[in-house]
Image: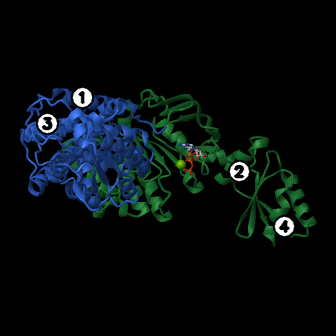
Chain colours: A blue, B green
Amino acid sequence: MNLRRLWAIMQKEVRQLRRDRITLAMIMVMPIVQLVLFGYAINLNLRGLDAAIVDQAQTSDSRALVMDMLATDVIRPVATARTPQGLIDLIRRGRINVGVVIPPDFEARKQDGRAVAQVLVDGSDATVAAAAAQLAQTPVDSRLPDLHAPYASTPPVPRIVVTSFYNPERRSAVNIVPGLIGVILTMTMVLFTAIAIVRERERGNMELLIAMPLSRSELMLGKVVPYVLIGLVQTTVILVLGRWLFDVPIRGSLLDVYLAALLLIASNLTLGLLISSRAQSQFQAMQMTFFIFLPSILLSGFMFPFSGMPRAAQWIAELLPLTHFLRLIRGIMLRNASLLDLWGDALALVVFTTVMMTAAILRFRKRLD
Amino acid sequence: MSETPAIRVRGLSKRFGQLLAVDHVDLDVPRGRVYGFLGPNGSGKSTTIRMLCGLLTPSDGEIEVLGLRVPQQAEALRRRIGYMTQSFSLFADLTVGENLEFIAEILGVPRERKRARIAELMERYRLADRRKQLAGTMSGGQKQRLALACAVMHEPELLFLDEPTSAVDPESRREFWEALFELTDAGTTLLVSTHLMDEAERCHRLAILDRGRLVADGTPGALTSALGGRTWLVESDNPRRAQHALVEAPGVLGVAQVGHALRLLAADGQGEDWAAAVEQRLHGAGLSALLRSATPNLEDVFVAATRSVGPGGAA
Ligand SMILES: Nc1ncnc2c1ncn2[C@@H]1O[C@H](COP(=O)(O)OP(=O)(O)OP(=O)(O)O)[C@@H](O)[C@H]1O
Ligand SMILES: [Mg+2]
């Protein structure tokens, strides 16, 4: 490893990047646009679902249960029906998303500890189904008034209230912004490095570079290091905007936040290098990036809760850097954990980076064939 | 200077799938000379050069460059050779100055000499007024001068130039070649590929490639004089019809129209009698014809070499 050559490659990379106005703009604009999109538009806590309620019991307790459900704001009555069949019709016709049925024998069921109400959900929309599931957790016995004390007593029937410890208002931005750092870094870092090398191959620069007295590691490191800085800039943009627009707190140490970001950046850059050693064209590099990006988004716990996924999906998720980063960053930013508390996930990222870098360097041949 | 040749190659082959792009080539390139690779498109010039630089792995054969085995010792060779690729491989989005600086850094030109060396090269290859221009925006000829400047940055012992003048006009080409001869004066060995006959004539020695095979090699003088007496100029009032009449004639290896005349290459061992017979044949076809002996050139050498290699040899 010769520092002078390494520096020359880095300098060249920065110079080229400086002239690439569009990429440069994307580096800044992408985090901003995504933050606003995810923060404002995608609200994972659905509220105000269109609903209809059939209360066939009409007792005071059943009416109280209905009021409790409405008080959650998850549903909003927009239609009326008299029978469960009527509700099913309304759902089929798309008039409502959720129907609630309280059967005539409500009181008797309550005594026996059987199901007292049925929530009918438009299952064709997964997010609606998830939101409506909250309804089923409305406590049936209104004599247990403290909804926000989850461990207050051990009730005989499952009446566990959805309670969020670290995000009491259940605002999704608080959950999403830390994760968004990971998503944006995953998307840009992998793509940038993958493309940076493949582009040289496409433009014919690679023939010059491999004919030079340059070692593989000088070439690879020199190409990725400038992107580390870009990743840190993106992290900063999201942190500042998240704070400013959505009041997202940073409860843990800022240093730990950046260290976690560095670990993810390193993992993704080395993954990009490995992709570049396989891809023949920029288009292929792009496709491979999205091949990694999609499972990252879906399985890492960014979109859907990790614990709810099938075993196999969890195993795959454990292989994705984003999964570990999400655990780190949520822990640090929202729960005031330290990087050391979460050493397992930090170590996973270090191992991932080492394996990818080694594989990329070994796979990269200083040959044209 | 040591007496071992700059390049020694035995049985070099390269296979791309079904295609044998380089077919058992033997080469001996002496030091301090301009050695030419002459061949048409797809004859395997670039492939051979890439194997000699250690950029492609040979399918078969042995290569020794400057006493080092290639591709095994290719990395040790990198500092001692320069390679100018056929297509522009410098960075289009860097300026001329930045490109030269990058190459100087990578090749480890001593810091204290770097500025002077770059200035010297920009002066010699007439790039001084383009220092701040992006390399991608330069003309083809300017790009090739920049590529040459980069290839000689570290004063290599051996320089591979793959069609270095393909985008250079004839006037500048002379100048380009003068620059190449300056390099040999300084002791550099040059291996230059080309498909231009006039360029090949400037080389000290020449290898002619055709469809991956080495069909002839030697000095241009020796190659052409070996064809003495076999080249003829046919003057006819209707050269196109005369050409048709001669393609099929016995003993004719090649006919090409040159202005109003035809250039005729005879098979080996044909003399004055054969020329008379050809004239007879043309008269018989109702054409006026006069055969004059012509001085052989490299084009004739090329035709002779590629047409006499056997039944599969004729294109
Ligand atoms: N990477 C490759 N894969 C498959 N075939 C190849 C490859 N490189 C070269 N070839 C083939 O090998 C043959 C020789 O190619 P090469 O580039 O060496 O020719 P050349 O003499 O340099 O021609 P030109 O004057 O056009 O540059 C050609 O038929 C070409 O199509
Ligand atoms: Mg070529």
Q: Which residue is mark 2?
A: B303
Asked if residue B153 can be seen in this view, the reply is no
**What's the mark number on residue A331?**
3
Callout 4: few (<14), some (14-19), or many (20+) C-alpha neighbours within 10 Å?
Answer: many
Q: Give the chain of mark 1.
A: A
Q: Residue at x 74, y 41 (%)?
A: B309
Q: Amino acid at mark 4?
A: Ala
* Pair 3/4: label in front: 3
Q: Are marks 1 and 2 on the same chain?
A: no
Asked whether the beta carbons under mark 2 and mark 4 sit within 8 Å of each other, the answer is: no
Q: Please provide percent x and percent y for residue B258.
A: 70, 65
**Quadrant in which residue B219 is drawn:** top right
The answer for how far apart the CA atoms under marks 1 and 2 are is 66 Å
Q: Give the chain of mark 2.
A: B
Q: Residue furthest right?
A: B284
Q: Which residue is mark 4?
A: B289
Q: Is residue B204 left or right of residue A188?
A: right
Q: Secondary structure at mark 2?
A: helix
Q: Give the chain of mark 4.
A: B
Callout 3: few (<14), some (14-19), or many (20+) C-alpha neighbours within 10 Å?
Answer: many
